[in-house]
Amino acid sequence: MRRLGHSDVLAGVLVVKDSARYGDLLRTRITLGSVMGNLENYLLLRSLRTLEVRVKAQSANALVVAEWLEKQSTITKVWYPSLKSMGDSHTLAKQLFKMPLPIMSFELSTAFEAIELCNAVKVIGVATSLGALSRDVYRNPSNLK
């Protein structure tokens, strides 16, 4: 499968308040290493340069999908704070975020429908990168084959 997005680097920041915990993490960092190489730094910088346009597109698409899901008879609940039907969560999301959020979840009426949906999706993978342009569906690990 060909990936179409920037799912080729993973980086993060770790912040701790406890000095003992910091010491443990520092020893682990020294032992295992934690400084990215030149290629990884280039890939991260490239991804950050296009992050805004990718998040805007994801957010706009997520809102359209959430509104569509809400109208489906087999969907019992759409968990998406940018929907007006979410009440207080919607009000809070409007205060906290400049645009709709790009991530949602939903519940189907029955477990059978959920299994049917997962079986109907042609490409299923465990989502390890939320920024990639791929078709990832999360399935309970106990159900993965």
Image (tube, rainbow, N blue to C red):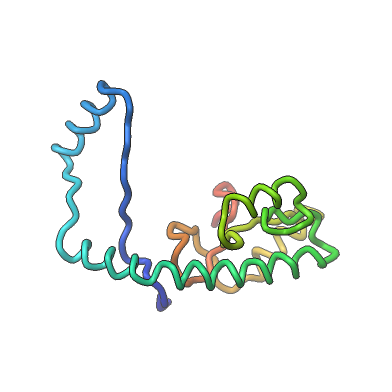
Q: Residue at x 67, y 70 (%)?
A: 120
Q: Residue at x 70, y 65 (%)?
A: 66
127 displayed left or right of 78: left
- The quarter holding residue 144 reads bottom right
Q: Residue at x 59, y 74 (%)?
A: 122
Image quarter of the C terminus: bottom right
Q: How many marks?
A: 0
Quick check: 102 above or below 46?
above
- Could you say where residue 125 lies in the image, as x and y percent from the top left? 50, 63
Task: Give the camera-side residue of 101 and 7.
Answer: 101
Quick check: 100 above or below 14?
below
Task: Give the camera-side residue of 125 and 62.
Answer: 62
Image quarter of the N terminus: bottom left
- The quarter holding residue 82 reads bottom right
- Could you say where residue 101 lies in the image, as x and y percent from the top left? 58, 59
Residue at the extreme front: 95
- Could you say where residue 56 lies in the image, as x and y percent from the top left? 52, 69
Task: Give the camera-side residue of 108 and 30.
Answer: 30
Q: Residue at x 81, y 55 (%)?
A: 76
- Could you say where residue 53 lies in the image, as x and y percent from the top left? 45, 73
121 displayed left or right of 68: left
